[in-house]
Image (cartoon, grey):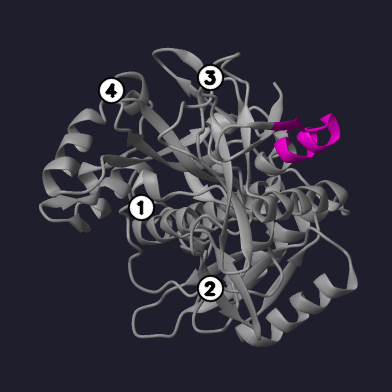
């Protein structure tokens, strides 16, 4: 598919070179770095100065080709698809919203810690307001702590807040994950006459069987754009094709294209990270078409347990923690709770990997922090040292990546700590 520079009156100027076209497609797909990004920035600047548009031939040799036009807001120039012109073909990358990889804004372990705060808004912006841009498509919320600022995308904050409030980050689980989410959602109003439970779906049937129709109609009746949220484990992501893969008892493995942004925790969609719990928006466009839009995904313990984790290493740590805590209960009648914080823990300015706690009536809780050590560089070790000072409780460094005996050592350390604090 070729891209042609044209004047605003439709007069052809010249075809973009293959190198520039490739760079622009990478940029739209969220994969442009270095020279490619510089090339696109220069192209957009030149287009705006000269009054040029881009015509895409993805629909063939038709007179009204789909148009991309440069628009400047503040100091940023971005591309916008002209919605009153022909739509791009479905196999064209410009049919989708631009991908934004918010790696720098993912909650990675770099000292930034989000405060939980009150419930985020679960209503989405109208589809028509979304722009493809080199700036972020939505205003993220700041993550504060340790003198640094990190950010969460809106979808990530929604998922984090729901997971914490519904108890997904706590062991032992108090209820099945989906049931817990639905009970919580019923208490959260999102619009006049609508609570979150009425527009939140946690089953592939919402996509396969059209369950979202009632939610769309309810939204329109309330005067908001037809929309709902879909939370479901994904078993695969193809960022280049912009496709999510899911499993269903009805249709087996099935793919869903994503029209908006795909953001993956840490920017890592490698196989060991799966399954990922994905939250995305289902929208009904003016044409009646239903699309999946703006997805955020993060590793979970397993498809049957939706505790959000950072990595496969943390899955291993969690499994060992569950094992030793089960032994403590069965043999010593000592109950130890496990929490996986997603926001600042206990006003410490820190977000530990895991917090074990023993609760006794009338006494302060005894806590042990367990950190899954995924790196060995000096800055990382320094941050972990600061955490040890700030949490004001014992910290065990689980160095399983480089230690074959790590599993045994973790279980032993937890058992000794728990038994020393049983009375």
Q: Give the CA distance from mark 3 to mark 1.
A: 33 Å
Task: Point out the frontmost of discs 4 and 3.
Answer: 3
Task: Point out the frontmost of discs 2 and 1.
Answer: 1
| Residue sitting at x 39%, y 13% | 250
First-in-chain label (1 vs 4) = 1
Q: Based on the displayed image, in which of its 4 quarters is residue 239 positioned? A: top right
- Give x and y (percent) for residue 257: 52, 27
Vertically, is 384 above or below 180? below
**Quadrant including the N terminus:** top right
- The magenta segment is 13-25
Element type at mark 3: loop
Disc 2 to disc 1: CB gap under 8 Å: no
Vertically, is 56 above or below 224? above
Task: Point out the frontmost of discs 2 and 3.
Answer: 3
Element type at mark 4: loop
Q: Give the CA distance from mark 2 to mark 3.
A: 46 Å
**Residue 16, numbered label:** none
Residue 390 appears left or right of 41: left
Tell me if residue 352 can be seen.
yes
First-in-chain label (4 vs 3) = 3
Q: Give the CA distance from mark 4 to mark 3.
A: 36 Å
**Residue 142, numbered label:** 2
Q: Based on the displayed image, in which of its 4 quarters is residue 362 positioned? A: bottom left
**Residue 125, numbered label:** 1
Magenta-span inclusion, residue 19: yes
Q: Residues within 10 Å of mark 1 (few under 14, many from 20)?
A: few
Q: Which residue position is annotated with label 4?
A: 210
Task: Point out the frontmost of discs 1 and 4.
Answer: 1
| Residue sitting at x 15%, y 50% | 194
Tell me if residue 237 can be seen.
no
């Amino acid at each position: 598919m070729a891209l042609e520079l044209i004047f605003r009156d439709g007069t052809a100027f010249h075809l973009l070179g293959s190198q520039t076209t490739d760079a622009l497609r990478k940029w739209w797909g969220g994969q442009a770095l270095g020279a490619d990004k510089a090339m696109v920035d220069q192209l957009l600047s030149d287009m705006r100065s000269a009054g040029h548009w881009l015509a895409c031939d993805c629909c063939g040799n038709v007179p009204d080709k789909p148009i991309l036009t440069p628009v400047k807001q503040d100091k940023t120039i971005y591309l916008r698809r002209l919605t009153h012109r022909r739509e791009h073909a479905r196999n064209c990358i410009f049919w989708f919203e631009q991908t934004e990889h918010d790696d720098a804004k993912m909650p990675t372990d770099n000292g930034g810690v989000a405060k939980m705060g009150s419930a985020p808004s679960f209503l989405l912006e109208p589809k028509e307001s979304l722009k493809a841009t080199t700036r972020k498509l939505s205003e993220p919320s700041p993550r504060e702590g340790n003198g640094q600022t990190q950010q969460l995308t809106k979808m990530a904050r929604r998922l984090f807040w729901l997971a914490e409030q519904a108890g997904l980050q706590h062991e032992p689980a108090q209820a099945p994950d989906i049931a817990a989410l639905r009970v919580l959602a019923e208490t959260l109003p999102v619009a006049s006459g609508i609570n979150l439970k009425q527009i939140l779906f946690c089953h592939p049937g919402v996509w396969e069987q059209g369950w979202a129709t009632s939610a769309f109609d309810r939204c329109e009746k309330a005067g908001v754009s037809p929309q709902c949220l879909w939370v479901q484990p994904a078993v695969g992501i193809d960022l280049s094709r912009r496709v999510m893969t899911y499993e269903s008892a009805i249709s087996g493995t099935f793919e869903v294209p994503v029209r908006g942004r795909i953001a993956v925790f840490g920017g890592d969609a490698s196989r060991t990270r799966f399954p990922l719990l994905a939250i995305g928006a289902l929208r009904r466009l003016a044409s009646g078409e239903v699309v999946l839009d703006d997805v955020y995904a993060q590793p979970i313990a397993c498809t049957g347990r939706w505790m959000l984790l950072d990595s496969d290493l943390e899955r291993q740590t969690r499994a060992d923690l569950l094992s030793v805590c089960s032994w403590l209960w069965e043999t010593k009648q000592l109950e130890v709770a496990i929490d996986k914080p997603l926001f600042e823990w206990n006003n410490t300015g820190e977000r530990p990997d895991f917090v074990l706690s023993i609760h006794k009536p009338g006494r302060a809780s005894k806590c042990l922090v367990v950190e899954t050590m995924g790196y060995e560089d000096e800055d990382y070790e320094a941050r972990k040292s600061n955490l040890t000072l700030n949490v004001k409780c014992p910290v065990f460094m689980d160095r399983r990546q480089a230690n074959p005996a790590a599993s045994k050592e973790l279980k032993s350390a937890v058992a000794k700590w728990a038994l020393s604090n049983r009375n």
